[in-house]
Amino acid sequence: MKNNTRKRLVENKLILWVVCIFSALTAVPLLLILGEVLMRGYDQLSWSFFTEPTPNAYKVMKAAAAGESIPGGIANGIIGTLIMLSMATILAIPIGILCGTYLAENSKNRFARIVSFMTDLLQGTPSVIIGIITYIWVVVPMKGYSAIAGSIALFILMLPLIIRSTEETLTILPVSLKEAGLALGGNRAQVMFRIQLPAAFGGIFTGILLAISRVVGETAPLMFTALGCSMIRWSINEPISAVPLLIWEFFNDPNLQDLVWGASLVLLIFVLTLNILSKYIAKKWKQ
């Protein structure tokens, strides 16, 4: 009996060590990426980096000849990213929440099952395909690239994530919550919008933040829709830049490749902030 107990304890410790080792190995690539981007991009962060647009080739060559650092920054990309993300989020939140609510309330309905299946297909569609479809649906009829087209592409990518987070959050709510609301005389719509959705706010908001962090780094859809612009532009009917587009442009220009690291660090910090915030909100909501 003692031998069996000792054997189980040894096996438990062995399995624990194996799990810990493999867990540490999964964190190694992330730490290496964070360290590399931080070391290479930290020196580039300055006030001008956030407030000035991308420099042209002449300014870069002139600064290089004089032995100076690369002038300019990524303000045009930051503004373009915020504009397109804001437009996409404004579209995706109400549609995603309403669709997720419908799926949660009518899970056995045939039409709901079809919508759920289509949501899964949309979630698994490569982003470059979304970009091509948006180009055909929006860019061609509008006869030009624009922030509107870019925001629609991001909206399509965000939508299934918000739908799924809403549906799953509402599904795990206690049934007694809905029954109590109905027993007090409220109809299904009132119970949903006044009781269930407020109770599920934490989980839904977490899903929204994760959806934003998922699409903020997308490059391929924006190449087909927003195209990019070297100037700071506020118009939504014209081509506009974004931080992922700038990273791609910097990488393909030998004179601007050093700016890749600063732009990557800004994008990485934004994504990490959203993920940490979503984890914090999810923890608070569970409590």
Image (cartoon, rainbow, N blue to C red):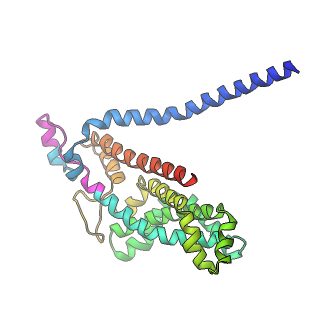
Q: Is residue 60 magenta?
A: no
Nearest the camera: 7 or 134? 7
Which quarter of the figure has residue 147?
A: bottom left
Q: Taking 9 as reference, is 254 above or below it?
A: below
Count of numbered badges drawn on the protein: 0
Residue 70 % position (x, y): 19, 41
Q: Taking 244 as reference, is 4 above or below it?
A: above
**Residue that appears at 53% across and 67% down:** 198
Residue 190 % position (x, y): 58, 78
Q: Taking 10 as reference, is 167 above or below it?
A: below
Which quarter of the figure has residue 251?
A: top left
Q: On the rendered structure, is 252 left or right of 103?
A: left
Residue 228 % position (x, y): 30, 59
Q: Is residue 72 magenta?
A: yes
Q: Quadrant of the N terminus?
A: top right
Residue 105 % position (x, y): 66, 72
Range covered by the magenta-colored residues: 61-78
Which residue occupies the extreme left position in the image? 66
Q: On the rendered structure, is 47 left or right of 219?
A: left
